[in-house]
Image: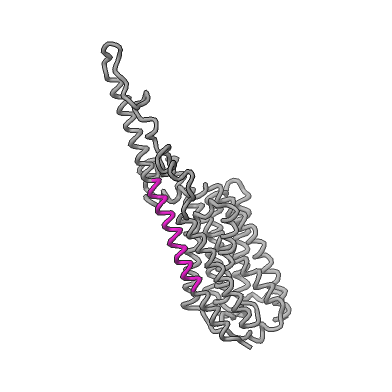
Amino acid sequence: MIDQQLAEVSNLLIVVAIVLYVLALFGFTADLAATTARRSDARIAAEEARRAEQAAQAEQRQAVPVGAGAPAVAGSDVSGVPGDASPDLSGHPSGGAGSADTAGAPRSLSAQGFAFLISTAATVAHTIGVVLRAVATERVPWTNMYEFAVTSAALVMVCFLVFSIRRRDLRVLGTFVVGPILLLLFIAQRFWIVPAAQLTPSLQNSHWLVIHIGVAILATALSILGAVVAGMQLLQARHERALAGTVDAPDASGEHWGRFGHVLDRLPASTTLEGLSFRIHSVGFVCWTFTLIFGSIWAREAWGRYWNWDPKEVWTFVIWVIYAAYLHARATGGFRGSRAAWLALAGFVAVVFNYTIVNTVINGLHSYSGL
């Protein structure tokens, strides 16, 4: 028996979560923009100070001493630059009034802190909406494309929040995580949403629905999160090469990235992102492995054979092979770094194709999209 009222509340909570995710995205983006502006101003100030120091040194070399020598400029060191005028890259001049005024005062909530709190509230509403969908239908909430997408998105956000609590520097990835989640939820609400309904007869009374699809949801969520990290790893690696002057660029400072280059300055190093991507994809690969194994067992019970060359089965195996190649490449010295990251992104493209095209265009035994 379907509880339509609970189902409506579930849909409402998903919409509320979308609104909160939008606010969180604004907060994360504002934090990136503000930090980008501060660092850009700090770099300009540092460059001006360096030029002033060089000009002062040139004047000293050209000056002809008279008597006991040229008088020293009051308030300056031997380089001619005030000792307290050199700004750091944090956006606050060292020893400035800003640090003195805030030393003993409580810190106000930053844009990043606001965005993190809002995204936490959104994830809570999102998760409750998924749970209410399960209560309303008296089954697991992942039996069609809409439910699978909504549940996977909630799991991605839970993983991101857990990682961000353990490592606060990863919160700068919030824009690049919340953005894809919003896109997925918008697509699900616009194209894939279906009324809450009972299971089809072929899916009823099978514990493998919980095990097989549950593991597949976890594998998909880790693939989404891993793809985000791998993509940022590629951008950060190229940015670092630009800063080192090892790629074609207008100058060695990486100014060809524009404002986005200052955004990348806030991200962890490419090696750190690579390690995180590897750990995420390692767990994801295990989940894809068990997705194949459990699916084969369920296929034996439902269709009489472990393997039926169904399009869904074939593409899941393709995904497994690509991620296996990624893990092997990551363990091989000559293919680590960007080359391995491209394989990880290729695996994610296969995941997207499997979930969208195979589910909606290619007919097969796994025609459970609900559309």
Based on the picture, tell me whether residue 20 belongs to the magenta stretch.
yes
Closer to us: 71 or 60? 71
**Picture coordinates of residue 89, whole percent (x, y):** 43, 41
Would you identify the image quadrant in which residue 303 lies? bottom right
**Picture coordinates of residue 346, whole percent (x, y):** 53, 61
At 61% from the left and 82% from the top, the residue drawn is 136
Task: Give the position of the N terminus as an image quadrant.
Answer: bottom right
Which secondary structure class fits the magenta region best? Answer: helix
At 63% from the left and 72% from the top, the residue drawn is 313
**Picture coordinates of residue 247, whole percent (x, y):** 42, 44
Closer to us: 144 or 119? 119
Colour mode of the rendering: one colour
The range drawn in magenta is 16-39
Closer to us: 128 or 255? 128
Closer to us: 97 or 316? 97
Based on the picture, tell me whether residue 323 belongs to the magenta stretch.
no
Q: Is residue 232 visible?
A: yes
At 67% from the left and 72% from the top, the residue drawn is 212
Horizontally, residue 185 falls left or right of residue 210, namely: left
**Picture coordinates of residue 338, whole percent (x, y):** 52, 51
